[in-house]
Amino acid sequence: MKYVSTRGQAPTLSFDDTLLSGLARDGGLYVPEEWPVFSTKEIGALKGLSYAEMAIQIIRPFTSGVIEDGDLATLVNQSYAEFDDPAVAPLKQLGDGEWLMELFHGPTLAFKDYAMQFLGRVFDHVLRKRGERVTIVGATSGDTGSAAIESCRGRDTIEIFILHPEGRVSEVQRRQMTTVCDDNVHNIAIKGTFDDCQNMVKGMFNDTEFRDHCKLSAVNSINWARVMAQIVYYFYGALQLSAPENPVSFSVPTGNFGNVFAGYGAKRMGLNIEKLIIGSNSNDILSRFFEDGRMLTTGVRPTISPSMDIQISSNFERLLFELYGRDGDITQTMMKTFSDTGLFEVGQGQLEQAQSLFSAQRFSDDETLAIMKQILIENKELLDPHSAIGVAAGRDKRINSGAPHISLATAHPAKFPDAVRQACGQQPVLPPSLSDLFEREEHFITLQNDRNQVQDFIKSHRMDGAN
Ligand SMILES: *Cc1c(COP(=O)(O)O)cnc(C)c1O
C-alpha cells in the first residue's frame, strides 16, 4: 500500500516513510492511495476473533510490502497483551440496542493507548530494520503525552521529549507522564499555555537545521498509523452485534476528528455503518460544520472535557479530501483559505454527502454534568465527561431504525476525578496498576517559554552515538 498527501503535491510514500514523516511536505496529511475493501463475506469471517486477531486482519492491507505477516502479528499481539480486560475493548449494554464500548483498558486509561501502543512498537520495528534512531517531540494538554511516553519508554531507537504547560494539566495526567523513569523519556514543564507548547513544537519542526540534526519525528493525531489502528475497534464492536449483514451506528466524543475519521475508514473498508454521531463540548467547530457546511474557528474555551478543547480539527482535512473526490488542488486551496481567514465553506453537494453519514451535537459543561449524573442513576455507570458527551450525542441523534448503537467511552472516570466528583458526588477509583500513582517519584524539568532554551535542552539530552 502506498500513501498520498491530501494536498496532492508531496511524493507518494510507502507505509514506513508515511509513519516516520507524520505531516506531508506540502503541509497535507497522508491517506492510503486507495481504501482496501472487504466483502461482506470476508467481514463475516472476522466474527469471533479476539481483538488482536482482528487487528492483524484489518491492519495487514495497510502495511503490506513493508511489515512481514509474522512481524505484524508479533507487534499487534504485544500491543494489546497488557490491557487490563481480556476483551481489550469490552462492550457493555446500557439500554435497548444501546451499547458502550470501553476504550480505557490500556496503560494510560484513555483510548489513545489503542493506537499508541501499536505505534511505539511499529516505530521501533521500522527504525531497527533501517538502523536509525529518532527524537520524538510532542506537546500535550493531557492524554496524548502519557500515551506516547508509555508506548516509547525504554526503546533504544527513540528519545522522547514531551512538553506540557506547567500547572495546566491535571495531577493524574501529570503524574502519568512524570513518574516514568526510563532514560529515554524527558518531561518538560513549560512556563506557558498548551498553545505555547504546541507553537514551540511547530517552531522546532520548521527549524530545518535542528530538525535534521535531531531527526525529529512526531506521534500526534495526524500520524496516519494512529487512524489506522483505531479502525480496528469499529469492526470489533460492530461484529459483536449486527454486522456484517445489518447496520450499526456509533457516537464518538471528538475534537480533532481523529477517532471518528477512523470510523469513516471502517465504513470505506466495507463495514455497514449507518451513522457516525459526533459529540462536542462548547468548542463546537465540528457541530457547527455539520449544520451549515462552514468551518469557522473561534477561540478555545476551557471545559471539563479538556481533551476536546481544540480550535481546529486537524484530521478533518482527510474527510475534506474525500468529499471533493480526492482532489488535492481543491483541498490545498480550501486549507489555505482556512489558514488565512479562519473560514472555509463546502458546497451544498459536499455538505449533503457529509450529512448522510455524520451528524453532531454539542453539550455545555452543565449539560455534561447532568448527563453524567443521569447515567449513574439510570444505568449505574460512572462515566468520564468525554464519554458522557458521546452517550448523550447518541441519544439525541440516533435515528430510529432499529440498528444497534455503540458509544465510544474514551477515558476511564478516574482520569477526570474533579468532574466526576462534581457530577456524581463520588471519587472514582484508579485501577490497580495505577493505585500507587500518587506515591511515585516524579521526574521533570521546568523551562521558560523560550524555544532556544528548550532546543538546547533537547540537543544536550539526546543519547549520542548511533547515527
Ligand atoms: C484525545 C481524546 C479525545 C478526542 O480525540 P480526537 O482525536 O479529537 O477524536 C476524546 N476523549 C478523550 C478522553 C481523549 O483523550
Image: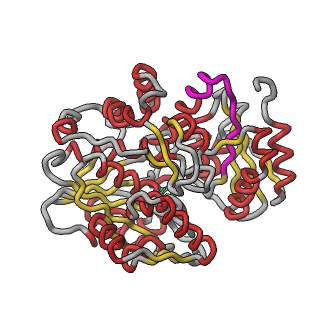
Is residue 200 shown above or below 105?
Answer: below
Residue at 51% of width from left, 41% of height from top? 116
Query: In the rendered image, is residue 194 in sight?
Result: yes
Whether residue 315 sits left or right of residue 348 in the image: it is right
Residue at 13% of width from left, 61% of height from top? 402
Q: Magenta stretch?
A: 125-138
Q: How many marks?
A: 0
Q: Quadrant of residue 306?
A: bottom right
Q: Nearer the viewer, residue 440 or 397?
A: 397
Q: Position of residue 322 (x, y in %)?
A: 39, 59
Query: In the rendered image, is residue 442 in sight?
Result: no
Q: Position of residue 323 (x, y in %)?
A: 38, 63
Q: Nearer the viewer, residue 261 or 251?
A: 261
Quadrant of the image containing the N terminus: top left
Colour scheme of this structure image? secondary structure
Q: Nearer the viewer, residue 143 or 323?
A: 323
Whether residue 106 sits left or right of residue 348 in the image: it is right
Is residue 291 shown above or below 9?
Answer: below
Q: Position of residue 38 (x, y in %)?
A: 25, 40
Q: Position of residue 360 (x, y in %)?
A: 36, 70
Residue at 57% of width from left, 78% of height from top? 298
Whether residue 241 sits left or right of residue 35 in the image: it is left
Let me know if residue 137 is in the magenta part. Answer: yes
Residue at 40% of width from left, 24% of height from top? 73
Quadrant of the image containing the C terminus: top right
